[in-house]
Image (cartoon, helix red, strand yellow):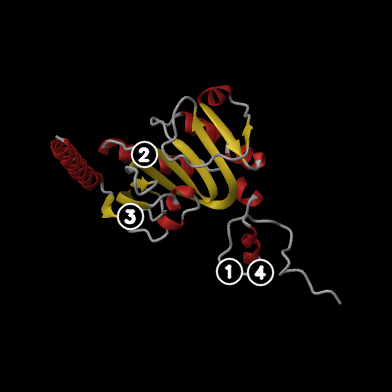
Amino acid sequence: MGWYVAIAAVVVMTAVAALRARSGSARQRALLQLCADAGLTCAVLDQFPDTTLLPFRLFAWGAAHGVENVVWNAAADDGIRVFDLWVQPRTDEARRTMTCGVVPLPFAVPPISILARGQADPSEEPVAGEVVHLELDAFEQRFEARAVDPRAAVALLDQRMMSALLRLPLRVAIHVHEDRMLLVGPVLDPGDVLVLLACARGLAAHVPSVVASLYPPRPSRGPYEGRWLQGSWSPDPTSADASEPS
């Protein structure tokens, strides 16, 4: 009797996997067609070498993860893209799949999280820092903002940015860390994937320029590069910058 139960379980699991594969293939074909019609680029496999280096735990979490169905506007050359991300927390757990958007930023800030109230964050990205209260009541009612450095959140979330966030047609969690903004939601329908790309580009257009003067971007080389080895940028010299005692 035990063999029959085991065989039946295998048959059911195989059937479920086959249905998911067919559903995924249909969604992928629809996404490819929509992107072709909209003049966007869509790649089944990730074409961006920096995805696994994004400064979020999500991209180094779990036993395995992968990036698929990447959509971007090649003509814009702005690094903004959306994609499906699957993560397998442990080898004995099922994969979790979500749709993400990435926006490069002209500055680098300590972690900021902007979470829609009453909605789960599929990324389970750690939320650090304290709650930051802002002056727009409509924003406070819909979102909770948390930041390691509240000044960074106040600088980023000016009136224009908060208004842009309130106009988002999709309910996504937003995490900002260093020079990247990450938008995360459940797996989206093909049409909503393109909507998420438009939302990401819209938010990029509303990023306040003043933030870069308060939080300079990570330098790729030069005398201040070593300061990033502390984990975040600091105006104070590191021990390597300090002069030797006489």
Circles 2 and 1: CB distance less than 8 Å?
no
Mark 2–mark 1 distance (CA, rounded to whole Å):
34 Å
The kind of secondary structure element at disc 4 is loop
Q: Which residue is mark 4?
A: 223
- Graded by Cα atoms within 10 Å as few (under 14), some (14 to 19) or many (20 or more), the crowding at tag 1 reads few
Residue 83 in sight from this viewpoint:
no
The crowding category of the residue bearing disc 3, from other C-alpha atoms within 10 Å (few below 14, some 14 to 19, many at least 20), is some
Residue situated in front as seen by the camera: 26 or 166: 26
Q: Nearer the viewer, mark 2 or mark 3?
A: 2
**Residue sitting at x 40%, y 46%:** 89
Q: For mark 3, what is the residue?
A: 74
| Mark 4 nearby-residue class (10 Å; few <14, some 14–19, many ≥20) | few
Instruction: Say what amino acid the circle numbered 4 marks.
Output: Pro
Q: CA distance from mark 1 to mark 4?
A: 7 Å
Disc 2 element: helix
Q: Quick check: 11 left or right of 68?
A: left
Q: Residue furthest front?
A: 1
Which quadrant of the figure has residue 228?
bottom right
* Badge 1 amino acid: Arg
Seen from this angle, which residue lies furthest right? 246
Q: Quadrant of residue 219?
A: bottom right
Secondary structure, mark 3, is loop
Which callout, 1 or 3, points to the residue nearer the camera? 1
Spot occupied by residue 4 in the image (x, y as percentages of width and height): 13, 36
From this viewpoint, is residue 144 visible? yes
x and y percentages locating residue 153 in the rendered image: 61, 39
Q: Earlier in the sequence, mark 2 or mark 1?
A: 2
